[in-house]
Each structure stands twice: as C-alpha cells, then as structure tokens.
Amino acid sequence: MTPRERVWAALRGGRLDRPPISFWGHFYDRESSARDLADATLEFRETYRWDWVKLNPRRQYHAEPWGVRHRYTGRAADKPTLESWPIHRPEDWAGITERPHDGGALGEQIEAVRLTRSGLPPDVPLLATVFTPLAILREMVPNPDDLGAALRARPQAVRAALDAVTATFEPFVRELLRAGADGIYFATVDWATRDRLSPAEYLEWARPTDLRLLAAAAGAPFNVLHVCKSRNLLFELADYPVSAFSWAATDATNPSLAEARTRLAGASMGGISHDGALLDATPERAVEELRRALEATGGRRWLAAPGCSIPPATPPGTLAALRSAVESVPLPAEPRS
C-alpha cells in the first residue's frame, strides 16, 4: 500500500498491510521561517519514512498577529521563552481585533505548508497544525490562569476577542487546505481538561468557536482533533466532525485506546507515551507500547503515533525501532463472515 492508501484505510477501518505510523516534534532551531520549518520537516520524514506528516510549527505562531513574541537561543533543545504579550491590563482585551489571515506569521505558515507539500511525495498526507480559538487566546497572557480569571471577570470582552480570533482563523484554515494540507491537526492545548474547565464550561466557552474552525475545514479528508493533557474531555468532544482523535492514551487519567474503540466514531491516533517510554535510553518499552496499542485496537481504525509532540531528546534509535516494528508486528486476523 502507499502511505496515503494505508492512512485512508486506517481512518475508515479497512484492511491494512501494516499500521500507519508517524511522529513529530519541535525543531526549536529551525522553526522561525517557512523554509527552515519545511526543510527540517522533510528531512525528518525522509529519515524515518513516516506515513503522514504533521507540520509542527512554533507554538506561538497563532498569537503573533496580536504581538506575542518569544526569544530563541538558537539551540535545538532549548524551548523559546516568552518575551512580549498583548494583555497587561483588563482593558487590553479590546485590542484583540480581527487580523489579516494571510499576513505575517499566518502567511509564513501557509507558505510552510506549500513548501512541505511540494517537497513530499504526492502519496504522503500532510496535516497543518491549528489551535482552537480559546487556546490561541491563552497565548496572549503569560499563563493559563490569567485567561481563566478573565473568562469570569470580563466575559463580554473575552468573548469579543474570541470571536475576532475565530474570524481571523476561518479563512486561514481554508487557505491552509488550498496550500496543500489534507486536513488540520486541531489542538485544544491547555483547555479540554477537567484540570482547567468543567465539561459545561468547555461547552460554553470553546465548543462554538471550535466548530466554526472545523466547519472551515469541512470536506478535508484528514482532520484530526488533538485533546491535550491529563483528565481530558475526549469523550465530551466525541461528536466533533473529524476523521481521527489524538490524545495521550497511555495516561491513566485519560480514556484508553480500548475504551475509545466503542466510544469514538473516528479513528484513534496515539498509543506511545511522548513523555515516558520515548525518553528511555533503549527502545524496548516504546516498542512494547506499540504492541499493546495494536492489541487494544485490533489494528483497526488506529494510527500509531505519540500522545503529543515528542521532546527533542527523543533517541533517534527509538524512533527507528518503532518504524521498524510496524513492519513486523502481526495484524489480527480478519474476522470470518
């Protein structure tokens, strides 16, 4: 099978020659321009021959149109540090207005999608990363608690800002698809977790704008919802119109892959602990997680992947071992009719 045939078959629960697999992470020293990000992504994909590519941009690009800036050290393993942000006083929320969807950092990401698509084999699907509007709004304050307090203290001002962000990103999402993305990887980041919001609060504050951006991506064959963090709200978002759901399934506070088989209409993406087994000096535990994920899913409607973006310290030998393992793990037998 080609990578695209394999991924599409996994999404619909069809027959496979082997599980599709992909990993992604930040290139902190190579994510500050479209060309650098595309080149780093293409080199990483070529090294391991992943079945699909998730373009993994700098986290803060979503909020840069509103003045968010980070400082980089130039070293591959160093996360950037926050340097400036737009919300310092309650009245600053009024400054979060609609921005051009194809200028500045947003235009750069559209170009990164074009460059990556043109460098990939045609049969390798490509995902573009987009945060949910509430997650984008969070980047405009120093920490999530600041936004949480504003939701309660200044709800009208925050709603207006949330609408402006959503209006900016609706045409941006459509432009990403025109640039060559097969769908969006739609990430909730800090917010779809009971540690931050109750299910009712998420329904009130995030769901309407989430669905607006997913409507902008409607018709794309490979939209993915990534539900971040522990104690997540995965099943509360199970009706979101996506092809696959990504989450940290090895986290004991989250739904397991086995539970998801009966609760999610879309495919499951994950099964390898991005902050656990992947960081071991040897690959044995990560490969065992792969085997357990295959057993839990029966190899149907499952894409082998990390629970979240992988750390720069992930040993290359572990990634190579996982890529090799999917070639040899036996798929479950087809059920008899």
Image: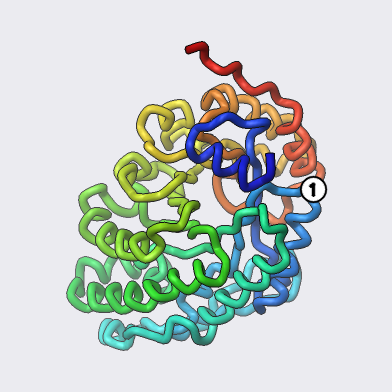
**Residue that appears at 35% across and 32% down:** 263
The quadrant in which the N terminus is found is top right
Toward the front, the furthest residue is: 337
In the picture, residue 88 is in which quadrant? Answer: bottom left
Dot 1 crowding, Cα within 10 Å, few <14, some 14–19, many 20+: few
Q: Nearer the viewer, residue 266 or 26?
A: 266
The location of residue 177, given as percent across then percent down, is 50, 67
Please tell me whether mark 1 sits on a helix, a strand or a loop: helix
Q: Against 309, is 326 above or below?
A: above
Q: How many marks?
A: 1
**Residue that appears at 47% across and 51% down:** 224
Residue 290 in the figure: left or right of residue 200: right
**Residue that appears at 27% across and 57% down:** 207
Q: Nearer the viewer, residue 147 or 131?
A: 131
In the picture, residue 91 is in which quadrant? Answer: bottom left
In the picture, residue 113 is in which quadrant? Answer: bottom right
The location of residue 172, given as percent across then percent down, is 44, 74
Q: Against 266, is 333 above or below?
A: above
Residue 91 in the figure: left or right of residue 329: left
Residue 311 in the figure: left or right of residue 245: right
Amino acid under disc 1: Pro
Q: Name the residue under label 1.
A: 316
Residue 12 in the figure: left or right of residue 15: left
**Residue that appears at 44% across and 69% down:** 173
Q: Against 291, is 160 above or below?
A: below
The location of residue 200, given as percent across then percent down, is 21, 50
Q: Which of 49 and 164 is in front in this view?
A: 49
The location of residue 148, given as percent across then percent down, is 30, 64
Q: Is residue 293 visible to us here?
A: no
Toward the top, the furthest residue is: 336
